């Protein structure tokens, strides 16, 4: 595959509390400093309509939706995200960095939520078609550490964090299972390290995959 054939979309995904938000912002900074036209977006959300759906998904009682309802809401949000944000940005030649994408549905609803990957893939194909990001970086760490980090945020977007520890253990295992399915698209990064170490590992993969020379600005102590 020539570099010109690669979709300029990078996803940072993984268990709750793995540092996706911080690392996606740091990657954005690296792209901007290197002079690239780039946007940072997120799921659920990423467009005005999708952000409306996000509130339904991430706030409230953890049992208010079953896995199938979650999946339907996720894909309603994802369709808006793609149509209104991701696809237009890519068409303009921009790079897209997304904090979560479709593998969250595969992990949370498909495997941990026990709908099955076949069900998720059927809906994914209907809503998304054949489009896939070029590179997915999975931040991996013990789910107990991730949940401790996530709960320290103290915001209202904690519906998934309130699900059982068994559920989150399944989510972590699901991401590792998904990552093992395609070693060209997926890379697993150890997120149980210092922030700078994680950032350096992420940028190393991105630089190698796209033949770039992105550099890290380290956090001041």
Image (cartoon, rainbow, N blue to C red):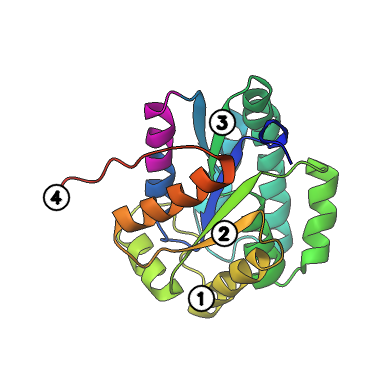
Q: Which residue is mark 2?
A: 187
Which residue occupies the foreground of this view, 38 or 100? 38
> In the picture provided, is 30 more to the left or to the right than 218?
right
Query: Which stretch did the figure color magenta?
Result: 26-35
Q: Which residue is mark 3?
A: 95
Mark 2 or mark 1, which has the lower sequence index?
1
Q: Residues within 10 Å of mark 1 (few under 14, many from 20)?
A: few
Label 1 or label 3, whichever lies nearer to me, is 3
Q: Secondary structure at mark 3?
A: strand
Q: Which residue is mark 4?
A: 221
Label 1 or label 4, whichever lies nearer to me, is 4
The residue lying furthest to the bottom in this view is 166
Mark 3 or mark 4, which has the lower sequence index?
3
Mark 1 or mark 3, which has the lower sequence index?
3
Residue 164, which numbered label?
1
Callout 2–callout 1 Cβ contact below 8 Å = no
């Amino acid at each position: 595959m020539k570099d010109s054939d690669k979709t300029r979309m990078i996803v940072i995904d993984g268990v709750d509390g793995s540092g996706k938000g911080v690392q996606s912002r740091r990657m954005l900074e690296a792209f901007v400093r290197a002079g690239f036209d780039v946007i940072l977006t997120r799921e659920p959300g990423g467009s005005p309509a999708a952000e409306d759906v996000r509130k339904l998904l991430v706030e409230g009682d953890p049992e208010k939706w079953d896995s199938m309802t979650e999946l339907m809401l996720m894909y309603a949000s994802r369709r808006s995200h793609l149509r209104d944000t991701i696809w237009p940005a890519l068409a303009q030649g921009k790079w897209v960095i997304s904090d979560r994408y479709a593998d969250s549905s595969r992990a949370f609803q498909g495997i941990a939520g026990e709908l099955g990957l076949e069900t998720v893939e059927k809906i994914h194909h209907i809503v998304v078609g054949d489009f896939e990001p070029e590179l997915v970086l999975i931040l991996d760490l013990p789910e107990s550490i991730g949940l401790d980090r996530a709960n320290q945020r103290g915001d209202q977007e904690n519906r998934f964090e309130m699900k059982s520890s068994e559920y989150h253990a399944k989510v972590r295992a699901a991401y590792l299972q998904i990552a093992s399915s395609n070693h060209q698209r997926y890379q697993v990064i150890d997120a149980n390290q210092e922030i700078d170490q994680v950032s350096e590992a992420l940028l190393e993969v991105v630089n190698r995959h796209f033949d770039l020379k992105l550099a890290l600005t380290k956090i001041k102590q």
